[in-house]
């Protein structure tokens, strides 16, 4: 069937052309990159920076304003949690009770559908038994989103015509605009789940009652409450028909202004009305705040846009930006005192678009460079321009087919998914190389002058089985990744899909599209001389035009044209012309690589980068050429000294296993997001003003670092169920500048410099870049104004394609880690805890998975909060001594640290006055805490009406004692007569899991240590303290380590079962190919050797001496980003990818060895070895080509520095190292094959 399909397409080339056109057009339409498709519609794959690996979670959020965490826990959280535990599919329930609200996180099993789980929760909430919760408390389901859905944060700021920040807007005014205009406008954008507000002041109508006047008029608080409630109401009274016209009747009674409320009647005696203004002061004022927003030291108002679950984040952000553009023209403006106009503007301070675009840009660049470098290898090693064009065309078409499959199967494009294509490029081209090499060989051996269709078909049919087997082993090797569960499954299953789709696409293109095109391209034609002259002349003309317009590659076209003319004039032979064209093409690709890759850095000249790229590409190919030239000699030696030779791969395997056992373990290398999230905490007793002061100090300190672009800090929570932060928790979103100034497409941009290398600004002033080595001593420059380089913006510089890149960072700042160290240095404030190094997305994922704000921690469970805290503090002291733990990052929750003022009511005293608990509590609630009784309706705006005592009568405990409680028959009684007021420390937040109270001890690891190793060290130290009696675990208390490392342990457990199973399946495929256990085992040795090679490369990366020298001033360890590599899931995925390709060379070699022995049937040891050498010599070229493409294609990945490279590099290292060492299998398989045949010969003779 396979061969019939191949033959059909060879004979019907138009079908192949139509298929190619379909794949290309459809793929371009679905491509996730921002390509200009012209008239083609765009339907791109959904795009995000990283997969959502958080738990399958829903939130039940319940507000109960003014209530303490203990009241919330006892009356809401605990009863609700026990009711929700019975929902089907629930894995665990986490909850937190804080001041004024309860958050319950229901974690479902992975296979439970997101919206199905929401419907089950709603069913349960609607059927709660009466009396389970206090009156007026209504639990609500949180937004249909996850914490990772927070994709766009912004502030509202006044800006002048030049975009400069202006004043003139008060915080209450900004908050009203945010709450009633901006919020609802952005909520209407497609894909938005909610928009939550933060910062500023929420306006309230405040009625501050005067207790003296109330006693004078004998009015109780309950009467004031009743009066306020009854003074704000509109009614409808049906209709009235007048003169046959129908009129709708409305009774107007809504409060529109302060005077409406002031004139509300409280009571009337003897025809005299007592109004609210007679006993109270009515004003506008701010509502109680539990969240603050600060931008670089100034209070701000803003919001956060949350994307709906399953929505395309990139598309949602674009929809939001469209709404902002629509909304901007309608936002208010005002004229300032200095005559400037201040226009209210929505200014983003966290926009995931940049991270997504830069991540895609990194992958786009890596794929482009991989394709270029693969084309170079093919041109040089195949040494046939037509064949090189055919094979090179395979890659982009196959990549476009992957985009089609991603769209069809709803696989999002992100750093991990697209990395599957990046690490598959080398393998994808292998099938084309093997096929084309065999076609060329058959054409050379076509002595019978068979038709080209027949020659190509025979060549394809001969290797189709081997190609199918090689691809199938690679695809099968990724089965373990598909079986991963939890976070690691969500992270890497998309990668397994894209790699499988890429290999399948390359197989389809190689077997069904390359043969018909090969039959066309390789067919000999008699081209008229006139046409050839015209063609070559056109090449020269186009080349010259390209040079005139500044495209150096025009030289290549000129060279092709000149060589063509020389060939036509018979000045050089056609064979020599072909060789010249091949080298010209190779040089062109080297030039493109040097221009776009720039491995030595964009600040180095194109010439230096060209030399380096040429040396590394031609150098590695030179090594492969030497390998090929000396292959027969080495093979003959190995066949004569089998035991001595085989000791080498054996030693490599043993060494590799030893390295594996001593390599550190972690879950995942972190993705560089281009921003940090600083999350320290203040002391639990700190109030709103103190937290505001500290937050502003933190923001101003961070903003003073030259590399920081913006810093916006948040204290407390946004108005969202997704943000349960207490007031003492800070979240400072820190955006740092890119290393080099970028253009609007997030690509490095060149700017004009003068002849001395100084940057020239639009105003004529000059800038010395401190990162350059230019020394300026001329008097001309001394007299000039030299601008500070760290205050320069892109708008001030002059774009120039022939200029230089402008570096934003100081010379001593070499990486984002250095910027973080600067942040840590300036944020050491008294009363503020340290914070682990976190990033926005990373933090949301960690909090979703573990409930903590750190990737590592200990969860302490118990029944008593004080015991949990005390034990946690003991663990904190021990953890600081553990090897690999960052001492300053260890912090145990101070659970019972919030000051409480308790009003302890004496029931005996109440009985004397005939007062109930309810009456006293209502007085306390209204007079001290205030009570929102109604809501004004002012157009689209709604404001609460609160009744309360004036601040001066409730500012301290002594004032509280003087609050009067009305007595039904008698004079009011002061609270001091009814209750005792005392201080006590209580919980700031009460956390629980499956109804058990919990506390956390957070910690972080030192650089250079692996997560799992640090946790194991800490576990061992704690156990040692317990065994020695230095630490006693109280009864009812238990602890366990938690964090992202658990994902690594789970993944390791899964892989320990599934990887052997996949290897067994690979072995079975090999067996079905060769029908021989012995031959299959020989090929299988390639996996063991490559496996060891991968670990050898990991070991080399961690050795300071390896490649520790400079090339043109660039240290090669820095160039290839060499540092200690821990054994993460990403590395294991790299090894799994390696398993699939490690057998490819062995399959090709063993196939031809079998065919050679079937043809030759040697009868002596000498003939056996000769046959082995003959087979090896004929198959060494395609094997080296496939290995070279795999190795060289990974070089751009290994040197990449953009967003996402942190994840791509660990996945590429095993394949790079494994395939380098796997070259030895080109000797191992022939040697083992020869040994087997020689042993069989001996048995036959005997």
Image (cartoon, rainbow, N blue to C red):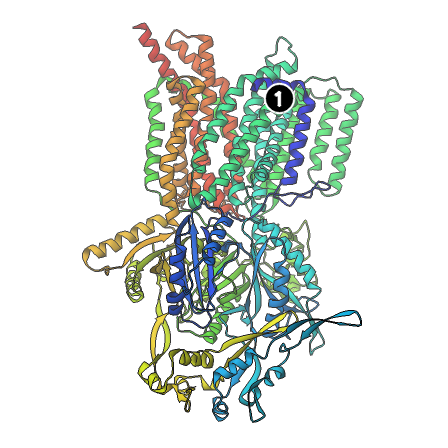
- Residue 402, image x, y percentages: 58, 36
**Residue 751 or 265: which is nearer the viewer?**
265
Give the left or right position of residue 950, taking residue 571 as reference: left
- Residue 1025, image x, y percentages: 22, 57
Residue at image coords 65%, 15%: 452
**Residue 682 or 541: which is nearer the viewer?**
682
Residue at image coords 56%, 73%: 202
99 lies above or below 1212 = below
- Residue 949, image x, y percentages: 48, 84
Q: Residue furthest left?
A: 1028
**Residue 1047 or 635: which is nearer the viewer?**
1047
* Quadrant including the C terminus: top left
Query: Where is mark 1, residue-wise?
Result: 515
**Residue 834 or 124: which is nearer the viewer?**
124
Residue at image coords 49%, 85%: 950
Give the left or right position of residue 530, taking residue 358 as reference: right
- Graded by Cα atoms within 10 Å as few (under 14), some (14 to 19) or many (20 or more), the crowding at tag 1 reads many
- Residue 119, image x, y percentages: 50, 52
Residue 1184: tell me if it is visible. yes
Quadrant in the rendering for residue 37: top right
Residue 906: tell me if it is visible. no
> How many numbered circles are shown?
1
Residue at disc 1, secondary structure? helix
Quadrant in the rendering for residue 592: top right
Give the left or right position of residue 1091, taking residue 284 as reference: left
């Amino acid at each position: 069937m396979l061969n019939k399909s191949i033959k059909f397409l060879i004979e019907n080339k138009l079908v192949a052309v139509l298929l190619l056109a379909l794949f290309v057009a459809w793929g371009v339409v679905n491509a996730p990159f921002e390509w200009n498709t012209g008239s083609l519609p765009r339907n791109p794959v959904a795009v995000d920076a990283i997969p959502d690996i958080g738990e399958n979670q829903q939130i039940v959020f319940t507000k109960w304003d003014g209530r303490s965490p203990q009241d919330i826990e006892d009356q809401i959280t605990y009863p609700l949690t026990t009711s929700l535990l019975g929902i089907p599919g629930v894995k665990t329930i986490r909850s937190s009770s804080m001041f004024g609200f309860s958050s319950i996180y229901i974690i479902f099993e992975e296979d439970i559908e997101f919206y199905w789980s929401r419907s089950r929760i709603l069913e349960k909430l609607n059927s709660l038994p009466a009396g389970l919760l206090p009156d007026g408390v209504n639990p609500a389901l949180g937004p249909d989103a996850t914490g990772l859905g927070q994709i766009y944060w912004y502030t509202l700021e006044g800006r002048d015509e030049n975009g400069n920040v202006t004043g003139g807007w008060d915080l209450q005014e900004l908050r009203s605009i945010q709450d009633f205009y901006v919020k609802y406008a952005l909520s209407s954008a497609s894909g938005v789940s909610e928009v939550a507000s933060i910062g500023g002041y929420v306006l309230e109508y405040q009625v501050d009652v005067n207790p003296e006047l109330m006693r004078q008029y004998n009015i109780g608080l309950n009467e004031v409450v009743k009066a306020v409630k009854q003074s704000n109401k509109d009614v409808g009274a049906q209709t009235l028909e007048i003169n046959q016209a129908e009129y709708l009747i409305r009774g107007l009674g809504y409060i529109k202004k302060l005077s409406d409320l002031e004139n509300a009647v409280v009571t009337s005696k003897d025809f005299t009305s007592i109004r609210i203004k007679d006993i109270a002061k009515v004003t506008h004022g701010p509502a109680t705040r539990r969240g603050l927003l600060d931008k670089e030291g100034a209070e701000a108002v803003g919001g956060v846009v949350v994307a709906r679950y399953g929505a395309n984040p990139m598309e949602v952000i674009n929809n939001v930006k469209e709404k902002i553009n629509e909304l901007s023209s309608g936002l208010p403006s005002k004229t300032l005192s200095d005559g400037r106009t201040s226009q209210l503007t929505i200014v983003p301070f966290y926009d995931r678009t940049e991270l997504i675009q830069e991540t895609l840009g990194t992958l786009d660049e890596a794929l482009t460079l991989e394709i270029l470098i693969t084309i170079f290898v093919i041109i040089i090693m195949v040494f046939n321009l037509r064949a090189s064009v055919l094979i090179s065309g395979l890659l982009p078409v196959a990549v476009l087919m992957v985009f089609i499959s991603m769209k069809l199967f709803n696989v999002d494009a992100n750093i991990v998914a697209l990395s599957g294509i990046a690490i598959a490029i080398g393998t994808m081209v292998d099938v084309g190389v093997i096929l084309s090499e065999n076609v060329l060989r058959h054409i050379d051996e076509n002595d019978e002058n068979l038709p080209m269709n027949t020659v190509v078909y025979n060549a394809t049919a001969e290797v189709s089985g081997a190609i199918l087997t090689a691809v199938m082993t690679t695809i099968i090797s990724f089965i373990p990744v598909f079986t991963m569960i939890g976070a690691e499954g969500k992270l890497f299953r998309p990668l397994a899909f894209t790699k499988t789709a890429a290999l399948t696409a390359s197989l389809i293109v190689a077997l069904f599209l390359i043969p018909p095109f090969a039959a066309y391209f390789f067919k000999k034609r008699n081209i008229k001389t006139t046409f050839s002259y015209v063609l070559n002349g056109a090449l020269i003309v186009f080349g010259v035009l390209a040079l005139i317009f500044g495209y150096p590659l025009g030289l290549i076209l000129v060279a092709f044209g000149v060589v063509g003319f020389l060939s036509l004039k018979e000045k050089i032979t056609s064979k020599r012309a072909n060789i010249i064209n091949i080298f010209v093409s190779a040089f062109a690709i080297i030039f493109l690589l040097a221009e776009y890759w720039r491995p030595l850095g964009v600040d180095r000249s194109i010439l230096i980068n060209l030399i380096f790229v040429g040396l590394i590409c031609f150098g590695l190919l030179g090594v492969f050429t030497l390998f090929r030239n000396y292959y027969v000699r080495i093979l003959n030696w190995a066949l004569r000294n089998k035991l001595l030779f085989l000791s080498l791969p054996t030693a490599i395997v043993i060494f590799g296993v030893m390295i594996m056992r001593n390599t550190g373990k972690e879950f995942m290398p972190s993705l560089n997001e281009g921003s940090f999230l600083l999350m320290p905490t203040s002391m639990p007793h700190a109030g709103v003003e103190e937290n505001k002061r500290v937050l502003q100090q933190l923001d101003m300190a961070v903003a003073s670092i030259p590399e920081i672009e913006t810093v916006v800090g948040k204290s407390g929570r946004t108005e969202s169920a997704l943000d349960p932060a207490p007031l003492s928790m800070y979240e400072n979103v820190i955006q740092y500048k890119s290393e080099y100034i970028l253009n609007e497409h997030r690509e490095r941009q060149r700017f004009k410099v003068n002849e001395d290398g100084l940057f020239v600004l639009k105003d004529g002033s000059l800038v010395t870049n401190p990162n350059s080595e230019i020394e300026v001593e001329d008097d001309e420059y001394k007299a000039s104004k030299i601008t500070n380089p760290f205050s320069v913006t892109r708008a001030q510089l002059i774009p120039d394609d022939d200029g230089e890149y402008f570096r934003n960072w100081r010379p001593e700042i070499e990486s984002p880690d250095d910027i973080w160290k600067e942040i840590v240095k300036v944020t050491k404030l008294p009363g503020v805890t340290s914070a682990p190094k976190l990033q926005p997305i990373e933090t949301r994922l960690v909090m979703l998975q573990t409930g903590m704000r750190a990737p590592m921690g200990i969860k302490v469970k118990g029944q008593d909060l004080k015991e949990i805290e005390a034990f946690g503090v003991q663990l904190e002291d021990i953890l600081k001594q553990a090897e690999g733990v960052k001492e300053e990052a260890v912090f145990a929750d101070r659970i019972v640290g919030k000051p409480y003022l308790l009003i302890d009511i004496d029931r005996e005293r109440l009985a004397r006055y005939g007062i109930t608990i309810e009456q006293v509590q209502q007085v306390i609630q209204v007079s001290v805490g205030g009570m929102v009784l109604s809501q004004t309706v002012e157009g689209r705006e709604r404001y609460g009406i609160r009744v309360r005592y004036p601040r001066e009568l409730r500012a301290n405990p002594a004032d509280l004692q003087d609050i009067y409680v009305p007595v039904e028959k008698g004079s009011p009684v002061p609270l001091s007569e009814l209750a005792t007021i005392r201080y006590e420390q209580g919980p700031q937040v009460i956390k629980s899991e499956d109804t058990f109270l919990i506390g956390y001890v957070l910690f972080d690891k030192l650089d250079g240590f692996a997560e799992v190793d640090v946790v194991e060290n800490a576990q061992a130290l704690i156990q040692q303290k317990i065994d020695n009696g230095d630490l006693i675990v109280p009864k009812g208390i238990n602890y366990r380590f938690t964090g992202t490392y658990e994902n690594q342990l789970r993944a390791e457990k899964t892989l320990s079962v599934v990887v052997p199973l996949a290897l067994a399946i690979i072995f079975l495929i090999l067996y079905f190919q060769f029908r021989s256990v012995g031959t299959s085992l020989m090929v299988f040795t390639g996996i063991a050797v490559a496996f060891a090679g991968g670990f050898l490369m990991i070991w080399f990366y961690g050795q300071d001496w390896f490649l520790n020298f400079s090339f043109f001033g660039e240290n090669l360890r820095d160039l290839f980003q060499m540092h200690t590599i821990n054994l993460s899931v990403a590395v294991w995925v790299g090894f799994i990818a390696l398993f699939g390709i490690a057998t490819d060379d062995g399959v090709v070699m063993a196939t031809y060895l079998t065919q050679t022995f079937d043809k030759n049937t040697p009868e002596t040891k000498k003939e056996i070895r000769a046959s082995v050498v003959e087979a090896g010599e004929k198959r060494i070229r395609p094997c080296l080509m496939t290995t070279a493409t795999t190795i060289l294609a990974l070089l751009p990945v290994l040197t990449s520095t953009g967003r996402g490279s942190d994840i791509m590099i660990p996945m590429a290292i095993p394949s790079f190292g494994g395939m380098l060492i796997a070259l030895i299998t080109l000797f191992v398989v022939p040697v083992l094959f020869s040994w087997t045949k020689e042993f069989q010969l001996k048995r036959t003779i005997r």
